[in-house]
C-alpha cells in the first residue's frame, strides 16, 4: 500500500483477554514492527485483562499507537466485544487478530490487501479455509439448522446437512446424502470487507464465542458471496491452546 494514503483502507482489530500480557504484547508489537503506521487504523478490545496488559494498552493508546481502545472489566466473550470493536469502523477492510496470532513478515499487510484487491466483489473474506462435518465440531447449538433459518442473514438456502436436501443436494458425490460440509475461514486471523460486516450485522448478536467463524462462513454462503482460501501469509495463527469463553 502507498505510504501517501491520507485515509487508511484497513482497520486492524486485536482482541486481548485476561492475564495474557505476553500474548497481547506480542501481537501488537508484531503489528507496529511489520506494518507502516500510515496504512492502518488499530482497534483493540480488552476483555477482563490483567493489570500489566491494561497499563500497556493505556500507554500505547495515549501515544497514538492504538486508535480506539475498548475496555470491559468483565469478560464479555469474543463476539459481544467484537460487535463493539466493529461499531465505528469506516475503512474498506477489517483485519482481525485473536491474541495468539501475530505478524511475522513485513510484507504481510500488502500480501493480504493485494489478495483482496485482486478478487471479485463477490469475494468478501480471506484467510485459511476450514471444514466441519458435524455441528458438534463447532457448536453446542442443538438445532443449528433452525438457528440458521431464524437468522436475519438467512436468504433461503438449505443449511448444510447430511440428510438429503442439505445445501440443496439429494445425492452428494453419489452417496445418496445431502452436503453436510460447513466451510469457513478460521477465526484466529481473517480479512473481511467492512461492507459485508454491515450487511450481515456481524457478529450475530446471539453468538458468544464458539463456532462464530463457522457460522460466519454459512452467513456468507447465504448471501451468494465467496470465501478465499489464501492461508495465512506472513502470519502465525492459533499458536496457543484454546482459552476463555
Image: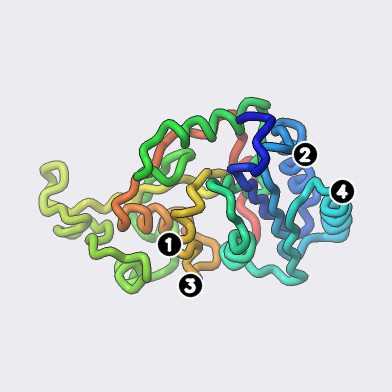
Q: Which tag, 1 or 3, sits closer to the chain's start?
A: 1
- Between circles 4 and 2, the one closer to the viewer is 4
Q: Which tag, 2 or 3, sits closer to the chain's start?
A: 2
- Between circles 2 and 1, the one closer to the viewer is 1
Per the model, the C-alpha gap separating discs 1 and 3 is 13 Å
Q: Residue at x 74, y 68 (%)?
A: 72
Identify which residue, 19 or 6, lies in the foreground.
Answer: 6
Classify residue 58 by image quadrant. bottom right
Q: Which tag, 3 or 4, sits closer to the chain's start?
A: 4
Which residue is tagged 4? Answer: 63
Identify which residue, 57 or 182, lies in the foreground.
Answer: 57
Q: Are marks 4 and 2 in contact (CB under 8 Å)?
A: no
Query: In the rendering, which numbered label is found on residue 206?
Result: 3
Which of the image's four quarters has the N terminus? top right
> Could you say where residue 187 lies in the image, as x and y percent from the top left?
52, 49
Which residue is tagged 1? Answer: 200
Q: Secondary structure at mark 1?
A: helix
Q: Secondary structure at mark 2?
A: helix
- Between circles 3 and 4, the one closer to the viewer is 4
Q: Residue at x 68, y 30 (%)?
A: 3
> Could you say where residue 238 lies in the image, as x and y percent from the top left?
59, 43
> Could you say where residue 33 lies in the image, as x and y percent from the top left?
76, 32
> Could you say where residue 70 lies in the image, as x and y percent from the top left?
73, 63
Per the model, the C-alpha gap separating discs 3 and 4 is 36 Å
Query: In the rendering, which numbered label is found on residue 29?
Result: 2
Q: Secondary structure at mark 4?
A: loop
Amino acid at each position: 500500500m502507498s505510504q501517501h494514503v491520507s485515509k487508511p483502507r484497513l482497520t486492524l482489530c486485536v482482541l486481548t483477554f485476561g492475564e495474557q500480557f505476553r500474548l497481547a504484547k506480542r501481537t501488537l508489537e508484531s503489528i507496529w514492527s511489520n506494518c507502516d503506521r500510515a496504512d492502518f487504523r488499530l482497534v483493540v478490545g480488552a476483555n477482563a485483562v490483567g493489570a500489566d496488559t491494561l497499563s500497556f494498552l493505556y500507554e500505547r493508546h495515549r501515544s497514538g499507537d492504538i486508535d480506539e481502545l475498548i475496555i470491559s472489566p468483565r469478560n464479555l466473550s469474543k463476539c459481544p466485544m467484537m460487535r463493539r470493536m466493529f461499531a465505528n469502523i469506516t475503512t474498506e477492510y477489517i483485519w482481525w487478530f485473536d491474541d495468539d496470532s501475530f505478524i511475522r513478515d513485513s510484507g504481510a499487510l500488502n500480501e493480504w490487501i493485494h489478495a483482496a484487491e485482486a478478487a471479485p466483489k463477490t469475494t468478501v473474506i480471506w484467510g485459511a479455509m476450514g471444514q466441519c462435518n458435524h455441528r458438534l465440531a463447532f457448536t453446542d447449538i442443538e438445532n443449528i439448522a433452525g438457528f440458521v433459518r431464524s437468522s436475519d442473514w438467512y436468504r433461503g438456502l438449505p443449511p448444510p446437512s447430511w440428510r438429503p436436501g442439505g445445501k440443496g443436494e439429494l445425492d452428494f458425490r453419489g452417496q445418496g446424502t445431502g452436503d453436510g460440509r460447513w466451510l469457513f475461514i478460521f477465526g484466529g486471523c481473517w480479512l473481511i470487507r467492512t461492507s459485508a460486516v454491515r450487511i450481515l450485522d456481524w457478529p450475530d448478536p446471539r453468538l458468544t464465542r464458539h463456532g462464530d467463524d463457522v457460522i460466519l462462513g454459512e452467513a456468507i454462503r447465504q448471501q451468494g458471496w465467496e470465501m478465499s482460501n489464501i492461508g495465512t501469509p506472513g502470519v502465525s495463527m492459533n499458536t496457543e491452546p484454546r482459552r476463555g469463553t
